[in-house]
Image (spheres, coloured by chain):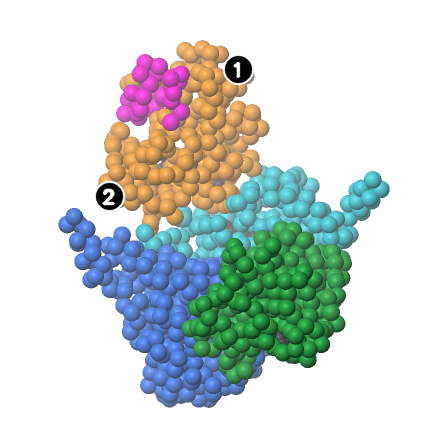
Chain colours: A blue, B cyan, C green, D orange
Amino acid sequence: MILWILKINKSDNMNINTDIGIKLENPFMLASGILDENGYTMERILNNGASSAVTKSIGIDERKGFDPPVIYHDENYVINAIGLSNPGIGSFKDEIEIALRSGKPVIGSIFGKDAEEFSLLAKKMESYKVSAIELNLSCPHVNGYGLEVGSDPDLVSEIVSEVKSKVSIPVFSKLSPNTSDIIEEAKAADKSDALVLINTVKAMKIDIHARKPVLSNVYGGLSGRSIKPVGVRYVYEIKKELNKKIIGVGGIENIDDAIEYIMAGASAVQIGSVIYKYGINIFNKLNNDLNEFFIKNDINDIKDIIGVAIK
Amino acid sequence: MILWILKINKSDNMNINTDIGIKLENPFMLASGILDENGYTMERILNNGASSAVTKSIGIDERKGFDPPVIYHDENYVINAIGLSNPGIGSFKDEIEIALRSGKPVIGSIFGKDAEEFSLLAKKMESYKVSAIELNLSCPHVNGYGLEVGSDPDLVSEIVSEVKSKVSIPVFSKLSPNTSDIIEEAKAADKSDALVLINTVKAMKIDIHARKPVLSNVYGGLSGRSIKPVGVRYVYEIKKELNKKIIGVGGIENIDDAIEYIMAGASAVQIGSVIYKYGINIFNKLNNDLNEFFIKNDINDIKDIIGVAIK
Amino acid sequence: MKYAYIIDNVQESENVNTIAFSSDDDIKPGQFIMAWVPGINEIPLSFSSINKIKKITVKIYGEASEHVAHLKRGDYLYYSGPYGKPFTIVPGKKLLIGAGTGIAPLIPIIDGNTYGIISGKSKKDIIFENHFKDRLKIVTDDGSCGMKGYVTTALKTVDLDKFDMLYVCGPEIMLKSVFDYIKNINVNAQFSLERSMKCGIGLCDSCSINGYQVCTDGPVFSVDQLKNMDEFGRTKLQYSGKRVYF
Amino acid sequence: MKYAYIIDNVQESENVNTIAFSSDDDIKPGQFIMAWVPGINEIPLSFSSINKIKKITVKIYGEASEHVAHLKRGDYLYYSGPYGKPFTIVPGKKLLIGAGTGIAPLIPIIDGNTYGIISGKSKKDIIFENHFKDRLKIVTDDGSCGMKGYVTTALKTVDLDKFDMLYVCGPEIMLKSVFDYIKNINVNAQFSLERSMKCGIGLCDSCSINGYQVCTDGPVFSVDQLKNMDEFGRTKLQYSGKRVYF
Ligand SMILES: Cc1cc2nc3c(=O)[nH]c(=O)nc-3n(C[C@H](O)[C@H](O)[C@H](O)COP(=O)(O)OP(=O)(O)OC[C@H]3O[C@@H](n4cnc5c(N)ncnc54)[C@H](O)[C@@H]3O)c2cc1C
Ligand SMILES: Cc1cc2nc3c(=O)[nH]c(=O)nc-3n(C[C@H](O)[C@H](O)[C@H](O)COP(=O)(O)OP(=O)(O)OC[C@H]3O[C@@H](n4cnc5c(N)ncnc54)[C@H](O)[C@@H]3O)c2cc1C
Ligand SMILES: Cc1cc2nc3c(=O)[nH]c(=O)nc-3n(C[C@H](O)[C@H](O)[C@H](O)COP(=O)(O)O)c2cc1C
Ligand SMILES: Cc1cc2nc3c(=O)[nH]c(=O)nc-3n(C[C@H](O)[C@H](O)[C@H](O)COP(=O)(O)O)c2cc1C
Ligand code: FES
Ligand code: FES
């Protein structure tokens, strides 16, 4: 009986708040591009357990994106080539306003072709009252065939510096795993307040009966369960080498996956593709399961396990 | 009744032989590093449906490799950090001799730190009567922190040229997906007779109860089902851009996976990790299932479907 | 991706065809598939028959629907799914209300106690009328078939009290007019919504209405759910995600 | 990776301990796990008890086995598995032949009709003798316990015809001597082999013998299988994969 009371008290004292430059009431954030193009959808997810939402990556102009199929999935992964569809920064103010009715922080994800575009977008986002900016550096590099902005360290460092000098809210850089040297990329983004790891891995699906690539764009980005070991590796390596604040993302399906990212060095995690399996209820479930994990394993504060696996 | 006879005849006329610079009686090869360090094991697998075996990557000296755990697996993937353990080229002659008793081609995989080492190893392998050389370019780059030989195009092109000038058997280059620009890497390896795509993807596993990385080396290479969409993508892209002969590898578990690689542009495929699920019997099963697929889909010759999905 | 061998194609009207194929999928009325037309597009389509032999009734709007509508015996239909929450089938007396091809996904609900209202612009839009025997009212804008008027014209002639459930399918404007007509009457109803869909699995946000995804939370919604959705009948999303007003 | 809470640790002899833990794994006699000692190594270990309470009997050779042998109540054992093909249990009269700790994985086979031979260098190597009541012969190199001699010394005193199956476990040299002794006699036997193992799942080739993987094709092999393996008792593999001769 006394034991039971102690457990209850313990749960009350448990701290699952976390800090990524902004304070979050729990470590579970909605990842960019999944159910966050629309203010109502973000609002609903924020009212159902997510501590914050990163918006779909928004550019200067409205973009229709690629024709469907833009998403292929099986039980282990999702491959998407949405084609950066977005309503354009001009009409995104309304969506953020709606999302902010939840009372929770919204993080504005943006993409552009150069430092100027990124800065413009960041300033607009700031004026819409987002709590932080997330730079999507995986958009196509204008000068490099098939390359991403993120694989050009000079450009990355220019974009980050520029944006930092233009806004006063925290700036996160989201890095892509499609690079030979992620440490270099991370160093280039050093002025960011936190790094978001990882974006999708280049991939594709061919339908052998139709004998054709499924996605209209042929190539897409792999996400979901299959990429978790890749994401954990990048979080661990960069935390160990650079000791930056990190937000982990990639293939998180359950509390064990989230804890693995946190022990690798992530201060918070983003949840994306898994929503196709469990719906938005995954956020409430993760919160419950985190509490249970803390009690079972005698953990009082999430800070005590961030990066604990690093040796 | 007549139909049935036609089917039988058709199966007789069906051609599943393929050509990757050497002729193979079927497209299913044993991938390097999986059950091919030992002559007897290779012999057994070659007697059970594999058309050829690529040896474990062999270096100049005997290497014990990393301490266990060197392999972690779950139902979707394998992560390995064997640490290039191998008996050394000096004592590998016996193993190849034993494997060759099967009457099937053996391909010698080698790794080294520079063109000189690769050449020496290739010449030895040729003298042991292998049918081709496979260059494992994913070994650590001596001058680049955390980088692989394969991410240095100049070094790759030097190694390939040197080796080609020293041996008269076909030379394959095995490329790593851990690079920002695989097209550049493939171009650097242009003198190879075929490209082998892909090696493992950098990854890791943390055990959340022990709070430690599982592999003694911390980082490892991801293989198995999870990486198939990545492998297919590289095969497709490089076949489309460079029209080289390609051997596909990565996450092939069943005939549909193999056909997907072939339709993406692979003339043959290598089978590795899946052996932990189905044992070496997978080779006989793939052969049966390929025949069945050809009959069902009215395909007479594997040549008719190589790269057929490319648009 | 699944694939099915087409065994039949029947033209229902000028630009509406029904294709038939056999599949083991377990489909409930109101669920849909994403039909992939390689090289062209991928579109949501629901079922007009859900037995072992499945049927899909397609109206030609653009390239993708045209391609599907013209699939002939021996062709393959590529698709994924089934997706979505189906209609809840209640025992008792049911009224099916469909606008044009909107009647198609309601056909699998028909049992011995079902009545129907089919609305359309004119006679050529009316299909499946023979599935209802005499338990059917037809209403067309131009009066070329049945009553002249809109769906509400027909509703006014029906004693809705007698029905245990209304099942409604058609363009959102038509759904809204039915909804407005019944929202203050004590009658139960389920509406199947149509929004542009890019994924079908609740990830892309392109089909959303007031934070709900039509592809996974719907396409079928109840009166009570719709009462809380102020976007219903008012706004829709462009492919870019931009919200526009009807 | 699985983990189990250690509930007991009993010292069996100078450098042999038995640890106990509870787990729902379904283990068959002869199967093994890969026990992970974080930061140190990962080693194959088999079971001396396979009920709900599982037991593992460990002899200390090096760092990893020492760590496992010293796990105490409240510690965790990390492992993966179970792996390997188990012994085939036949009805009838069985003879268990174990060298030193080699007797441990045979203990779960014991039923009302089992006899035993335990061999060892000297008295301190003999464990588990109390599991056999009087149906046991002990043989030691130095004669400090039971007969003086080798395992074959004890075999000579037994009428092997009467046994339906022999189960043999110990160092390969000992297995080979039993194998040579019985290969021309008409008696059935199963041998559990020990080779260095890096993966346990049939990928790394480090445990191979004549092309067979001890971790997946074994560790238990029949007389007929071993007759075709000329490496048996003759060669083994180094961690590098290099073949060396005993
Ligand atoms: C859940 C769900 C189930 C559906 N079930 C069916 C079904 O069973 N049968 C069926 O025929 N359709 C059904 N639809 C509609 C169908 O998906 C669209 O008709 C199709 O996407 C049109 O694609 P397209 O490429 O042929 O035309 P597009 O090229 O996309 O369109 C051509 C033109 O037609 C207009 N248009 C397209 N679709 C519609 C529409 N539905 N209503 C009005 N104007 C339109 C477009 O705005 C454009 O101007 C369903 C839709 C949803 C969301
Ligand atoms: C299928 C299988 C099941 C096994 N089951 C058991 C079991 O139930 N209980 C048990 O105690 N052991 C068992 N073993 C053996 C056990 O795995 C080894 O003793 C262990 O790997 C030693 O690891 P270590 O790191 O402690 O010693 P290491 O550091 O690897 O070795 C230290 C020294 O001891 C020598 N050595 C190591 N192992 C052995 C050995 N088995 N025989 C002789 N010399 C050795 C080494 O060569 C070295 O000189 C089993 C082995 C296999 C393959
Ligand atoms: C459909 C879809 C759309 C995405 N769009 C974006 C995007 O606009 N911007 C971005 O930074 N990441 C985008 N991503 C990547 C995710 O934010 C995330 O990094 C990735 O999916 C890995 O996480 P997951 O496995 O939890 O999905 C998208 C992912 C998916 C599946
Ligand atoms: C245990 C293990 C060891 C490997 N060793 C090598 C090696 O020595 N040389 C090499 O080129 N590739 C090596 N690989 C990579 C495989 O050959 C193959 O490229 C990769 O595993 C992807 O194929 P799969 O998914 O079918 O396993 C190894 C893979 C595994 C799992
Ligand atoms: S169609 Fe993508 S969320 Fe509904
Ligand atoms: S231990 Fe790796 S193959 Fe047996």
Q: Position of residue A74 (x, y in %)?
A: 54, 58
Left-right relation of B226 to B192: left
Instruction: Confirm whether circles 1 and 2 share one chain.
Output: yes
* Residue found 58% across the figure and 53% down from its top: C26
Closer-to-camera residue (B94/B28): B28
Quick one: which residue is furthest to the right in this view? Answer: B2
Q: Quadrant of the N terminus of chain B?
A: top right
Left-right relation of C143 to D82: right
The vertical placement of D142 against C39, above or below, is above
Cβ at disc 2 under 8 Å from ligand 2: no
Estimate the spatial distance between the alpha carbons at disc 1 and disc 2, rounded to whole Å.
Answer: 49 Å
Q: Chain of mark 2?
A: D
Q: Are marks 1 and 2 in contact (CB under 8 Å)?
A: no
Q: Chain of mark 1?
A: D
The mark closer to the camera, 1 or 2, is 2
The vertical placement of C210 against A237, above or below, is below
Q: Quadrant of the C terminus of chain B?
A: bottom right
Q: Position of residue B257 (x, y in %)?
A: 61, 54
* Residue found 53% across the figure and 45% down from its top: B277
The vertical placement of D157 against A90, above or below, is above
Q: Position of residue A145 (x, y in %)?
A: 59, 77
Total number of numbered discs in the rendering: 2
Q: Which residues are magenta?
A: D108-137
Quick one: which residue is furthest to the left in this view? Answer: A2
Q: Callout 1: helix, strand or loop?
A: loop
Q: Earlier in the sequence, mark 1 or mark 2?
A: 2
* Residue found 51% across the figure and 78% down from its top: C233
- Give the residue number, with chain letter if any, for mark 1: D185
Is residue A116 visible from the viewing direction of this image? yes
Q: Quadrant of residue C184?
A: bottom left
- Give the residue number, with chain letter if any, for mark 2: D74
Q: Residues within 10 Å of mark 2 (few under 14, many from 20)?
A: few
